[in-house]
Amino acid sequence: MVWVERIAINIKMNKIKDPLQILQVWFSSSFPIGSYAYSHGVEALIDKKKINNKDDVKEYLKALLFYGTLRNDYIFMKSIYKGEEINELILASASSKERKIEIIDMGNSFRKIMKDSWELSLPENTSFIYCLAKAGLHFDIKFDDLIKFYLQSFISNLINTCVKHIPMSQKDGQTLNFIFINQIQEFLTHSDKLTLNDIGTTFFIGDIYAIKHENLNSRIYLT
């Protein structure tokens, strides 16, 4: 009766007309890719007192968005939507061993859910951004919608890390989430012409502390 179950699943998938419903599921805190377990090096910055308050968090996240990882992720996702096969390039762009682990582990978790519950097969050991883009294409989700959800989710996850471990108030955390709705829109407005030739980062402190995280004496997060 497995074939009957698969037909039922396919019928359900075909009935999903609103891509925002899909994105709300993928980026929900209940979607088990384990993103809460990764701090992207923020834990090391907090541990070394480089990030101490809301203003520090805002400056860190702006740099990550406009000059660091998220800028590159925007370029990668847009390029995949245009038909580029660049998983190896994405993996090679990781600035530390732990960041490479982060993007592969989250990608594999997402891939497993897609195969088990969404009837979509994706290659093993591919990056999270690659898996997201391929799934987005499969379910006819517009690039503009997927990238907004991705950027906001990434930033919100790091804000939550800071709320818990600086510590910072919930009010400050929500204020930052609100601020970055506009920051993301500003970034997207000025990033349309970016291509794979623009891959790179000038946010060196973020990359350095992602490396330093590997040697923290006591740590909560995997990266």
Image: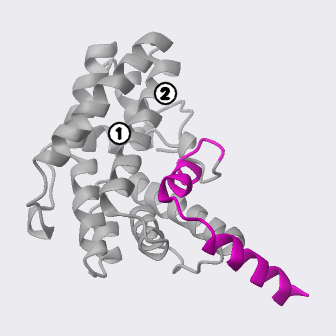
Instruction: Residue lying at the far right in this picture: please name it.
Output: 1
Q: Residue at coordinates 22% horizontally, 62% vertically from top-left?
A: 75
Query: Between residues 147 and 124, which one lies in front from this camera angle?
Result: 147
Amino acid tagged 1: Lys
Question: Which residue is disc 1 drawn over?
Answer: 212
Would residue 199 be found to the left or right of residue 80 on screen? left
**Picture coordinates of residue 127 (x, y %)?**
43, 66
Return the disc, 2 or 1, that comes first in the chain's sequence.
2
Q: Quadrant of residue 60?
A: top left
Q: Is residue 7 visible?
A: yes
Q: Residue at coordinates 61% horizontally, 70% vertically from top-left?
A: 114
User: The residue tagged with tag 2: helix, strand or loop?
Assistant: helix
Q: Quadrant of the N terminus?
A: bottom right
User: The residue tagged with tag 1: helix, strand or loop?
Assistant: helix
Query: Between residues 108 and 75, which one lies in front from this camera angle?
Result: 75
Residue stretch rendered in magenta on the structure: 1-30
Q: Is residue 40 visible?
A: no
Amino acid tagged 2: Asn
**Main secondary structure type of the part rendered in magenta:** helix
Q: Quadrant of residue 2?
A: bottom right
Question: Which residue is disc 2 drawn over?
Answer: 160
